[in-house]
Amino acid sequence: MRIGELAQQAGVTTKAIRFYETRGLLRQPPRSVSGYREYGAADVERLTFISTARRLHLRLDDIAEILRIREDGERPCDYVRQLIGERLEEIDQRINELEKLKTTLQELQRYANTLPKDDGSICPIIAHAQHMPTGASVTTAEG
């Protein structure tokens, strides 16, 4: 089957397939005489596995390690259990950070409702946040 058919069967984009190939998660397929990539049922299974692991927010390096362990003839379940535990800890930490952020934003919202007259700052709401405890802020994916 060609890349478009593989993408459709696995529920991913052709761009994702090419990306996984460059990362070594999916083998480079043989090509037909006309130059098209030729995939098989094993590729659908592997790509579906990769897609499911990504939906669980496993990192690409983790997925590569799971696949490597399996290719070495071992079951990667112990490693996957460890990863799940790590992700749960990260989620708990993120939930804690988000709860702190929610409290901070609620306080800022209350402050915004009693906003003083123009004090010359760019925005007195943000200026007020500068004086709040540092533990009440959260870092985002952007930094």
Image (cartoon, rainbow, N blue to C red):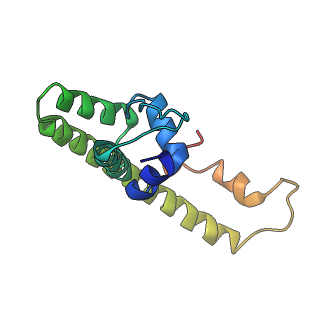
Q: Residue furthest top?
A: 72
Q: Is residue 39 above or below residue 126?
A: above
Horizontal relation, residue 79 to residue 13: left or right? left
Horizontal relation, residue 108 to residue 9: left or right? right
Inspect this view and state whether residue 27 appears. yes
Residue 35 is situated, as x and y percent measured from the top left of the image, at 54, 33
Inspect this view and state whether residue 134 appears. no
Of 6 and 139, nearer the camera is 6
Q: Is residue 141 above or below residue 52?
A: above
Task: Quadrant for residue 43, please give it.
Answer: top left
Residue 91 is situated, as x and y percent measured from the top left of the image, at 34, 50
Q: Residue furthest bottom?
A: 113
Residue 94 is situated, as x and y percent measured from the top left of the image, at 40, 50
Residue at image point 42% right, 29% down: 28
Task: Quadrant for residue 62, please give it.
Answer: top left
Of 91 and 128, nearer the camera is 91
Q: Quadrant of the C terminus?
A: top right
Residue at image point 11% right, 30% down: 74
Of 19 and 41, nearer the camera is 41
Residue 118 is situated, as x and y percent measured from the top left of the image, at 87, 63
Residue at image point 18% right, 34% down: 79
Horizontal relation, residue 94 to residue 105: left or right? left
Residue at image point 45% right, 33% down: 21
Instruction: Count all numbered tags in the image, as a single digit.
Output: 0
